[in-house]
Amino acid sequence: MTILLGLIITLGCMLGGFMAMGGHVMVIWQPWEYVIIFGASFGTFVVANPMKTIKDSGKALLEAFKGKIPKNDDFLAVLGLLFSLMREIRAKSRNEVEAHIDAPDDSSIFQKYPTVMNNKDLMTFICDYFRLILIGNARTHEIEALMDEEIETLQYDAMKPYHSMVAMSEGLPALGIVAAVLGVIKAMGALNESPEVLGHLIGAALVGTFAGIFMSYAVVSPIATKIKTVRSKQLRLYIIVKQTLLAFMNGAMPQIALEYGRKTISSYERPTIDAVEEQTLSTGSNEPVQQAA
């Protein structure tokens, strides 16, 4: 929603200011200039990126427009799941715990946290490292190094749409100049026309330069930044898992280990200790307690 609000403000101020100066909005409406700019921009985007990145860029755009970042309930669900699994490791045999890790879709513990189950990558991340904890031979610093490496890889993949959008935004001003030059070429072929007609053609050509710069700095680049923000916040869930499990491996009680994970959440998004305690106390029920965001 913030993207749409920002675009409305940007377009409103730009068009309003232009009209206040006495400009005619219809002069800016040059559809073929926009076809040249946006068509060439999208074409270079397709050339520069593999199909997987193109599809992921579409997914990232939807996430950015919807503001799909972890909410308070998502943080509580991850912390509640980690607490349940850590408690299982302390209270039950290895075989009993492995049943949950090897088949999370059928696990009564995982089924209490559908938001985690819907995030397949996160669920795999959690299961993989709990499996290493159950093996018992890995040292904490080795697990930490492995987690850092995997999170770095996840971040690299998650930011591919951001980098592709930044590259597109950087090329738009130049493509706007291309559209403007083509418009000038068209105008040069009409030098025998009246000054009124020639002025209209030159004005239409200059719209290309305007459109390229405006779309680059006022639309595509801010959206790319929004994608980066959303994807970075989504990766915060992995950091929570990492810090919680490392504390648990170093001998912390499950409730204390959760504090290590909770503290990695931004202060204005972090659930309170009472909310986390309420979540962990509800692990024996069929549904986890949901805290309003």
Image (cartoon, rainbow, N blue to C red):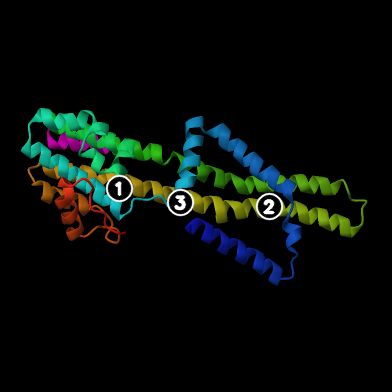
Residue bearing mark 1: 236
Say which residue appears at 48% left-offset and 59% top-offset. 2
Q: Are marks 1 and 3 in contact (CB under 8 Å)?
A: no
Which amino acid type is marked by label 3? Lys
> How many neighbours does mark 1 have within 10 angstroms: few (below 14), some (14-19), or many (20 or more)?
some
Residue 136 appears anywhere in the view: no
Of circles 3 and 2, the one toward us is 3
Magenta segment boundaries in residue numbering = 138-149
Q: Secondary structure at mark 1?
A: helix
Residue 264: x percent and y percent? 24, 52
Q: Is residue 25 left or right of residue 118?
A: right
Residue bearing mark 2: 209
Residue bearing mark 3: 66
Of circles 1 and 3, the one toward us is 3
> How many neighbours does mark 3 have within 10 angstroms: few (below 14), some (14-19), or many (20 or more)?
some
> How many neighbours does mark 2 have within 10 angstroms: few (below 14), some (14-19), or many (20 or more)?
many
Say which residue appears at 32% left-offset and 36% top-offset. 121
Q: Main secondary structure of the magenta part?
A: helix
Q: CA distance from mark 2 to mark 1?
A: 40 Å
Residue 167: x percent and y percent? 53, 43
Residue 274: x percent and y percent? 17, 60
The part of the image, by quadrant, that contains residue 158 is top left
Which amino acid type is marked by label 1? Arg
Tell me if residue 142 is in the magenta stretch: yes
Which amino acid type is marked by label 2? Thr
The C terminus lies in which quarter of the figure? bottom left
